[in-house]
Amino acid sequence: MSNLIDSQQRSGAIQTVSLSFFRFSRGMDRLWALAMMGAAHLSLPRVPDIGFWKLLGSGTGEGFTPIPNTAVYAILATWPDLVTARKQTRSASIFRRYLARASESWTVFLSPTSARGYWAGQAPFNPDECPSQGPIAALTRATVKPRKALRFWAQVPDISAVIGADPNVAFKIGVGEVPLLHQVTFSIWPDADSMAAFARHDGPHARAIRAVRDGDWFREELYARFVVTGEAGTWGGTSPLQNIKGQP
């Protein structure tokens, strides 16, 4: 990863993060997607220009549950620029295999604006010091300490309900690498102000953050913010960004 970041800094290229979601309707395709959570580890490192990458499953509903959803999977990856990200998520062999099997897919392209913490011991995102304008995305990733897992998941339904009730959130989902222990939350907002207002509100989200800090629930944490720079495909039959003014 350090070589990738050094190359970006020398060339002036802006790192692009792709987050691709795939929905599988048929039972045989769901079994294939589950098997690919292991098998794709052999193919993704061979994709030209790919940097950091992760295979992600989801929970039931909108993903904010510990019960696996066998219909929805995701691939997160970093690329040297947006052109490369668009090309490879459309034409690289492993992505084409997912697209051919999926009944629906949606990829959102992101430019990091801030990041702190680590993901599997790495700092995968290279924030741009001069971000462009656009909808804002937030990603949090945590490794939950096993002895704290039940307390952590007891907080999640209330947080999910509050995010879903917020009229500003355009998209939200919970995904993860390992059920119960490795969790990722991802949401998209019209602008930084609406996202900050939600974070400051003294509700379940704020109380959960205080509980995490006071109880030392996480072994590893990552918090990142992005500008949404593009999309491809649909989710739920439409673009999740359709109601955001000034969408890319």
Image: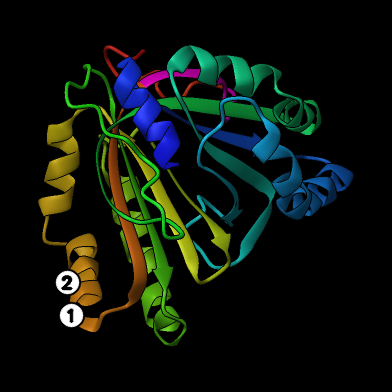
Q: Quadrant of residue 13?
A: top left
In this rendered view, identify the residue nearer to me: 183 or 9. Answer: 9
Amino acid at circle 2: Arg
Check disc 1 and report its element: helix, strand or loop.
helix
Q: Quadrant of residue 221?
A: bottom left
Give the percent coordinates (x, y) of residue 181.
Answer: 50, 71
The residue located at (36%, 49%) in the rendering is: 123
Q: Give the labeled residue for mark 1.
A: 214
The residue located at (57%, 23%) in the rendering is: 234
Label 2 and label 1: CA atoms lie apart by 6 Å
Residue extent of the magenta highlight: 229-237
Q: Give the labeled residue for mark 2.
A: 210
* Quadrant of the rendering where the C terminus is positioned: top left
Q: Is residue 43 above or below residue 150?
A: above
Q: Quadrant of residue 136?
A: top left
Give the percent coordinates (x, y) of residue 11.
Answer: 34, 16
| Residue 71 on the magenta segment | no
The residue located at (24%, 82%) in the rendering is: 215
Give the percent coordinates (x, y) of residue 88.
Answer: 62, 20
Q: Is residue 160 above or below residue 124?
A: below
In this rendered view, identify the residue nearer to me: 70 or 215. Answer: 215
The residue located at (17%, 51%) in the rendering is: 199
